[in-house]
Image: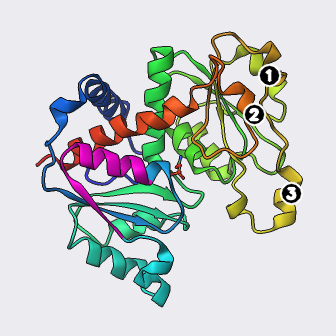
Amino acid sequence: MRECLITTKGLTREEIVEVLDYAAKIEKNPSSYYGNQSGKIIGLLFYEPSTRTRMSFETAIKRLGGDTISMGSVEMSSVAKGESLADTIRVVAGYADAIVLRHPKEGAAKMASGFIDIPLINAGDGAGQHPTQTLLDLYTIRKSAEKLDGLNIGVMGDLKYGRTVHSLSHAITKFDSRLNFISPEGLQLPDNVKYDLERSGSEVHQYTNLDEILSTLDILYVTRIQRERFPDEEEYRKVSGQYRINNKTLENAPKHLKIMHPLPRMDEISPEIDGSDHAIYIEQSHNGVAVRMALLDLMLKS
Ligand code: CP
């Protein structure tokens, strides 16, 4: 496994499958991995809010026998005094064996990795990428569909600012599955992501109406409109609430359709779906522990 994980762009199919296979082994028999990383410290630098990513990384390293140190909230750290990311990351690299970084600026993880010589994992850089979310998304898809090839996958919502979408799209190009992008006008996939996908040989199928494609889908990956990334509240209001999944929306959905969401959700999936066989988003978030245990164990092996 590579030393830093910044983006899914450069990941090979073999590297992805290695993590997923290892996570499956860990999920089957977690206790036999306890203690593998005894004494190791992970530095958590979260410049943006997080529940799942931060807590599942904490759980993962603690289950492996290691521990975490955390900068805590930005307001309670020296970032509030104006300390630069470069200085903070170099300091924490002296305390930890690896760093997990979430930052509001696209490109921050790549930039930060250049200042240190310990592994750095990108836990989300603005509207850029969220590669460990992708690994757990792929793990969830494979667990549910028993394959990653030959699937028809719909990705719906804020495709412009949704970093989980960007990471997942790049990773899916390593498999023989079709991606269908459903979004309101103005929140389509950014040109640079579309260009990269097409350059890697993928066709980019874009829709504004879920009904055009719903009956053919195996997986529907729904995302939140990323309110915090909009430069203008009025622009957000124009598109918010345009897509809502409820029982009525799913009337023509295939029985086997699985609905995923990186969470947190706002109102894009009605709670009435939660108890249905379609909903796998809570299980998806739980899969983050096994996948992050696998990733950390592979990256910290020395
Ligand atoms: N999916 C995800 O990144 O969730 P958090 O923002 O809670 O970490």
User: Compared to 273, does 91 lie above or below?
Assistant: below
Q: Quick one: SS at disc 3?
A: helix
What is the C-alpha distance between the residues marked 3 and 1?
A: 24 Å
| Residue placed furthest toward the top | 255
Amino acid type assigned to the residue bearing label 1 in the image = Asn
The numbered dot on residue 237 is 3
Indicate which disc residue 270 carries. Answer: 2
Q: Measured from the top left, where is residue 245 in percent x and y?
A: 77, 31
Q: Is residue 227 left or right of residue 296?
A: right
Q: Residue at x 85, y 61 (%)?
A: 235
In primary-sequence order, the first of circles 2 and 1 is 1
Report the disc number at residue 247: 1
- Sequence-wise, the earlier of marks 3 and 1 is 3
Instruction: Answer with left or right where residue 4 lies relative to residue 148.
Output: left
Q: Are marks 2 and 1 in contact (CB under 8 Å)?
A: yes
- In the rendered view, would you say 159 is above or below 119? above
Q: Residue at x 42, y 33 (%)?
A: 287
Q: Is residue 253 visible?
A: yes
- Which of 297/78 is in front? 78
**Residue 55 falls within the magenta-colored stretch:** yes
How many residues crowd mark 1 within 10 Å: few (<14), some (14–19), many (20+)? some
Magenta span includes 268: no
What residue is drawn where x is 63% and y is 11%?
Answer: 256
| Place of residue 299 in the rendered image (x, y in percent of width and height, measured from the top left) | 23, 47
* Chain part drawn in magenta: 54-70
Q: Nearer the viewer, residue 15 or 204?
A: 15
